C-alpha cells in the first residue's frame, strides 16, 4: 500500500489514479455503478449487485467494471443502476430488479441499445 | 394536463389594498386571459410579504422577480414582456433598498432559479465510498495537505471564521468561533468529536455523507484537529446506521494505510487518530453533552451547561463537537478559500444547506441548495408539487423538535436569520410537508409521543412535561379535552422551554406551541364541537353537519 508523505506524493498518486482510469476507459470497458446507500440497499440494490456479479462469474459479461456509490438523493427511483458504455453519456436506470438488470445487460451492455422504459430523468433537479 | 409554468403573487396587505392591489390583481387576471395564458399562469395573493416600502408588490415565480410599486397601467407591460415573451422588465423592478431583506435577497439572484449547488454532497453518488483512490481523484486530501504544509493552525481557524460557516446541526453556531474557543482554552489533550448521531425523525442528510463520502469527514476532522491542536478524534455514529459505521471504519483503515491518518502526517509533526464509535439508539445522545457522557462509557444523559464542551468536554478536556454536514464543508472552504464560500447563499447565512424532503409531495429525496431558498420553491421545483394536487397546510422544518411553518410562511427565505425573524427554526434540514388532510392534533400527538419515549428522565420539566403534554393532546384527540387544557399546555410548554436541562426538553414543545399559534381554531373545534375537520381523529365527528343519507 502506498504511503503519502507530502503534497507532491499526493499529487503523484493522484496522477497515477488518473492514468489508471484513462487506461481502463481506453480498453472500452463498460462501467456499471449501483447506488448502494442504505436507501438503495433497502430497496433491493444488493440483489441487483448479485445479479450482475452472477452474470460476470458465468462469463456472460466481458470488459465490465462493476462499482458502487452512495445515495444521490433520488430516493423514489432506488435501486439505481448507472451504465456508461465507452464514450456514450451515462444512462441512469431506476427501480431496477434482477429481472430488469438481466434485460439491461443483454440489450444495453451487450446489444448497445438503451432500454428506454426503465431510464429515469437524470436531471430532475436543476444543477449549476 | 394543465401545467402551471409561472406564478404571480400580488400583495394584499392593508397598505397594498389601499393602493389598489385588488385592481392590480383583477388586471392580471384580465391581461393573462387576453394573452391566452390562463392555463399556464396562476395568479394568487400573498398576505404580508413583509414589505414596508412601495406597494402593491408583485412577485413572479419561478424567476423570483419582484415588481413594486405596481399600478394597473403596469400590468399590461409585465404580462406582455415577462409572462408572454419571457423577459423581466427591469424598469418596473422594485428598488433593492426599499425592500425588506426577506424580499430583497430574491433580487440578488437576478431572476435565476434557485438551482442545486453541491458542496457537501459533491462526491456523494459519484464516487465509490469504499475507495480512497476515488476520493483522492476528486480533490480528496488537497485541503489537508494545504493546511498542514502551507497554513498555521490560526490561519485555518481564521479561514473558517471568514467563510461564515454556521453549524449545520440545527443551532447555527459559527464554526470558526467554536474552534477558536477550543484553540484558546488551555489544557491538553484536546478532542475533536464528529456528532453523527443523527436521530431527528425525517433527517437523513448526515447519513448520505457518511455512507456516500466518508473520507471527507475523516479529512475534515483531521483538519479540525490540526486547527485546535488535538490528536484524537471520535465519530459518534447513530446505532441505526450500520452501513455508515462500516464505511467510516473502512475509510479510517484505508486512510491509515496510506499514511493520511496517524503519525507525522504529510511529513510534519502533526499526528491524528480517529476512533469510530457506534451509538445504541438513544435520541438524547445527539445532544452534545449526552453524547460525550456516552462516549465516556456512562449513561447517555446531558450535563449541566455551562461549562460548555469547548472548555469541559470529553474526559473533562476542551472539545470541539461538530455536525457531519458542518465538517463536510471544511475541506471545500480550505481548498477554494473563504471568499469563494461567502459568495454562496445569503449574506448572513453563507453556503449551502442539505434538505431532506418528505411528506405529501410528488418527489421525496435530498437536495443541496444555497441558503435562502423558500419553502414554495422547494415544494414546487424539487418536490415536484403537492401529491394529488392537494393544498399545502404546513411544513415542519428540522424534524420533530423543529417548528411548524404554516402555508402563509412559504415565501420566507430559508436561512438562519430570516427564519429566526419569522419565528421558525431552520433546524437540521428535514422538511416534512403536510397537506390539508393532516390533522394538527394528531400531528402533535405523534410528535409528543416520540418525546415522551425519548426523554432521558434526568430533569423533571422534561420527564413530567412530555408525559403531561402527550396525555392532554391524546385527551383532545379523543374528544375529552377542555379549553382550559390549552392554557395548561402553553404553561407546561413554556416551563419546559425555560427550565429543561437540555435541548430535548427545551424543544419538545416547539411544534405544539406553533400549532397553538397558527392552528388554534382547529384544536378548539376538537374540544368545543367534538369535530375533527380532517377526519383523522376517529373518535370525533368529521363535520358539524352530518352528511345526507342517500
Image (tube, grey):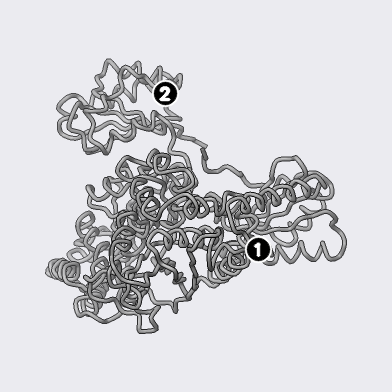
Camera-nearest residue between B175 and B403: B175
User: Mark 1 — residue?
Assistant: A45
- Residue B487: x percent and y percent? 12, 67
> Can residue B2 be seen from the camera position used here?
yes
Q: Tell me which corner region of the image, top left, top right, bottom left or bottom right, holds residue B79.
A: top left
Residue positioned 39% across, 69% down in the render = B191
Quarter in which the C terminus of chain B is drawn: bottom left
| Drawn side of residue B233 relative to residue B347, left or right | right
Q: Secondary structure at mark 1?
A: helix
- Residue B465: x percent and y percent? 21, 75
| Drawn side of residue B119 relative to residue B545, left or right | right
Residue positioned 43% across, 48% down in the render = B386
Residue B63 in the image: above or below residue B501: above
Task: Give the chain of mark 1.
Answer: A
Task: Give the chain of mark 2.
Answer: B
- Residue B250: x percent and y percent? 60, 69
User: Mark 2 — residue?
Assistant: B83
Residue B110 in the image: above or below residue B87: below
Estimate how packed mark 1 is, as few (under 14), some (14 to 19) or many (20 or more) residues with alpha carbons within 10 Å. many
Amino acid at each position: 500500500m502506498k504511503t503519502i508523505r507530502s503534497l507532491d506524493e499526493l499529487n503523484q498518486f493522484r496522477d497515477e489514479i488518473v492514468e489508471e482510469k484513462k487506461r481502463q476507459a481506453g480498453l472500452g470497458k463498460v462501467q456499471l455503478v449501483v447506488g448502494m446507500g442504505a436507501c438503495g440497499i433497502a430497496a433491493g440494490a444488493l440483489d441487483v449487485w448479485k445479479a450482475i456479479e452472477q452474470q460476470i462469474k458465468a462469463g456472460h459479461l466481458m470488459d465490465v467494471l462493476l462499482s458502487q456509490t452512495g445515495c444521490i438523493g433520488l430516493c423514489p427511483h432506488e435501486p439505481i443502476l448507472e451504465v456508461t458504455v465507452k464514450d456514450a453519456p451515462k444512462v441512469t436506470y431506476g427501480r431496477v430488479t434482477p429481472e430488469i438488470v438481466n434485460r439491461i445487460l443483454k440489450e444495453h451492455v451487450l446489444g448497445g441499445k438503451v432500454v428506454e422504459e426503465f431510464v429515469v430523468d437524470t436531471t430532475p433537479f436543476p444543477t449549476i | 394536463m394543465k401545467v402551471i409554468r409561472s406564478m404571480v403573487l400580488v400583495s394584499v396587505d392593508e397598505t397594498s389594498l389601499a393602493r389598489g392591489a385588488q385592481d392590480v390583481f383583477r388586471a392580471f387576471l384580465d391581461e393573462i386571459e387576453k394573452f391566452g395564458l390562463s392555463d399556464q399562469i396562476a395568479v394568487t395573493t400573498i398576505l404580508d410579504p413583509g414589505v414596508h416600502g412601495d406597494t402593491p408588490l408583485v412577485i413572479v415565480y419561478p424567476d423570483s422577480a419582484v415588481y413594486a410599486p405596481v399600478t394597473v397601467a403596469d400590468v399590461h407591460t409585465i404580462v406582455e414582456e415577462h409572462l408572454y415573451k419571457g423577459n423581466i422588465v427591469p424598469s418596473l423592478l422594485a428598488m433593492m433598498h426599499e425592500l425588506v431583506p426577506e424580499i430583497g435577497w430574491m433580487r440578488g439572484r437576478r431572476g435565476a432559479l434557485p438551482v442545486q449547488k453541491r458542496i457537501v454532497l459533491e462526491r456523494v453518488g459519484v464516487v465509490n465510498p469504499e475507495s480512497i483512490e476515488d476520493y483522492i481523484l476528486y480533490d480528496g486530501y488537497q485541503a489537508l495537505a494545504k493546511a498542514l504544509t502551507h497554513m498555521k493552525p490560526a490561519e485555518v481557524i481564521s479561514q473558517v471564521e471568514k467563510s461564515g460557516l454556521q453549524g449545520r446541526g440545527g443551532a447555527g453556531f459559527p464554526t470558526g468561533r467554536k474552534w477558536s474557543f477550543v484553540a484558546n482554552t488551555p489544557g491538553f489533550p484536546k478532542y475533536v468529536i464528529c456528532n453523527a448521531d443523527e436521530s431527528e425523525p425525517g433527517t437523513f442528510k448526515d447519513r448520505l455523507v457518511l455512507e456516500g463520502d466518508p473520507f471527507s469527514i475523516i479529512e475534515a476532522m483531521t483538519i479540525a484537529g490540526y486547527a485546535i491542536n488535538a490528536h484524537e478524534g471520535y465519530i459518534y455514529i447513530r446505532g441505526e446506521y450500520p452501513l455508515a459505521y462500516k464505511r467510516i471504519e473502512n475509510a479510517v483503515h484505508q486512510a491509515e494505510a496510506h499514511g493520511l491518518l496517524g503519525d507525522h502526517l504529510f511529513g510534519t509533526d502533526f499526528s491524528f487518530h480517529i476512533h469510530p464509535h457506534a451509538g445504541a439508539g438513544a435520541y438524547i445522545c445527539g445532544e452534545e453533552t449526552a453524547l460525550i457522557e456516552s462516549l465516556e462509557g456512562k449513561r447517555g444523559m446531558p450535563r449541566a451547561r455551562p461549562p460548555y464542551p469547548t472548555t469541559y468536554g470529553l474526559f473533562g478536556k476542551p472539545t470541539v463537537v461538530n455536525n457531519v454536514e458542518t465538517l463536510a464543508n471544511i475541506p471545500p472552504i480550505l481548498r477554494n478559500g473563504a471568499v469563494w464560500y461567502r459568495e454562496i447563499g445569503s449574506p448572513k447565512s453563507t453556503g449551502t444547506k442539505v434538505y431532506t424532503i418528505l411528506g405529501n409531495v410528488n418527489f421525496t429525496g435530498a437536495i443541496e441548495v444555497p441558503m435562502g431558498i423558500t419553502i414554495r420553491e422547494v415544494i414546487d421545483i424539487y418536490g415536484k408539487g403537492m401529491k394529488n394536487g392537494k393544498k399545502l397546510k404546513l411544513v415542519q422544518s428540522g424534524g420533530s423538535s423543529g417548528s411548524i411553518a404554516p402555508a402563509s410562511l412559504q415565501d420566507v427565505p430559508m436561512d438562519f436569520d430570516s427564519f429566526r425573524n419569522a419565528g421558525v427554526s431552520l433546524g437540521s434540514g428535514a422538511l416534512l410537508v403536510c397537506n390539508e388532510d393532516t390533522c394538527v392534533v394528531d400531528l402533535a400527538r405523534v410528535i409528543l409521543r416520540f418525546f415522551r419515549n425519548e426523554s432521558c428522565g434526568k430533569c423533571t420539566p422534561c420527564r413530567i412535561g412530555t408525559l403531561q403534554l402527550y396525555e392532554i393532546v391524546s385527551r383532545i384527540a379523543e374528544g375529552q379535552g377542555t379549553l382550559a387544557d390549552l392554557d395548561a399546555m402553553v404553561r407546561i410548554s413554556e416551563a419546559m422551554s425555560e427550565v429543561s436541562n437540555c435541548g430535548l426538553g427545551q424543544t419538545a414543545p416547539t411544534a405544539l406551541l406553533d400549532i397553538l399559534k397558527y392552528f388554534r381554531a382547529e384544536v378548539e373545534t376538537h374540544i368545543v364541537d367534538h369535530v375533527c375537520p380532517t377526519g383523522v381523529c376517529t373518535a370525533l365527528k368529521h363535520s358539524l353537519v352530518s352528511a345526507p343519507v342517500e
